[in-house]
């Protein structure tokens, strides 16, 4: 089994500059997106779900009406990896395409 390389906290905080709106909380990348309403929030989740499945890397998702909170961390590596930053970047781009902020 291939060892997954984790990203330390110092490097993660440096890389957050490339991910506006994202924070580092409890060892995970986290961001809340707001949409025009519940249908737009669910549309975003469905689109992100297919993208996450294709990448074989899935965020934790919480829906509160028109707000969606995502958390990325690679549980199998017990830390952040390149997959988490790629997923966060994809989520930001996707939210922008469907009207999220």
Image (tube, rainbow, N blue to C red):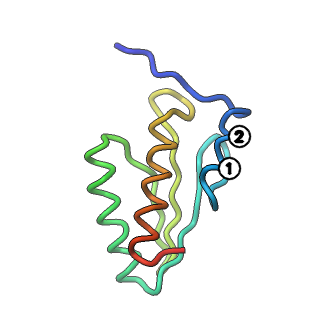
- Residue 74 picture location, percent across and down: 48, 36
Residue at the (52%, 41%) spot, across then down: 73
Q: Residue at x 44, y 78 (%)?
A: 99
At numbered mark 1, what does the secondary structure look like: helix, strand or loop?
Answer: helix
Q: Residue at x 71, y 40 (%)?
A: 14
Q: Nearer the viewer, residue 96 or 33?
A: 96
Residue that lies at the very extreme toward the right in this rendered image: 10
Q: Quadrant of residue 13?
A: top right
Q: CA distance from mark 1 to mark 2?
A: 6 Å
What label sits on residue 17 in the rendered view? 1
Quadrant of the frame with the N terminus: top left
Where does residue 57 sit, x and y in percent of width and height?
A: 37, 42
Residue 53's disc number: none
Q: Position of residue 89 (x, y in %)?
A: 49, 52
Q: Compare residues 100 and 56 and report the one nearer the observer.
A: 100
x, y percent for residue 4: 46, 22
Residue in view at x 31 percent, y 42 percent: 55
- Location of mark 2 (residue): 14
Indicate the quadrant where residue 15 lies.
top right
- Asked if disc 1 and disc 2 are in contact, CB closer than 8 Å, the reply is yes
Name the side, left or right, on which 25 lies relative to 58.
right
Label 2 Cα neighbours within 10 Å, binned few <14 / some 14-19 / many ≥20: few
Q: Is residue 58 left or right of residue 13?
A: left
Which residue is outermost to the bottom? 36
Looking at the rendering, which quadrant does residue 6 occupy? top right
| 55 vs 66: above or below | above
Quadrant of the image for the C terminus? bottom right
Mark 1 surroundings: few (<14), some (14-19) or many (≥20) residues within 10 A = few
> Which secondary structure, mark 2?
helix
């Amino acid at each position: 089994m291939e060892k997954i390389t984790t990203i330390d906290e110092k490097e993660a905080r440096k890389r957050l500059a490339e991910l506006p709106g994202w924070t580092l909380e409890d060892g995970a990348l986290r961001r809340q997106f707001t949409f025009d309403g519940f249908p737009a929030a669910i549309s975003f989740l469905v689109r992100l779900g297919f993208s996450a499945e294709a990448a074989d890397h899935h965020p934790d998702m919480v829906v509160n009406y028109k707000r969606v909170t995502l958390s990325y961390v690679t549980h199998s590596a017990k830390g952040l990896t390149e997959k988490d930053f790629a997923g966060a970047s994809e989520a930001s781009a996707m939210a922008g395409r469907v009207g999220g902020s």
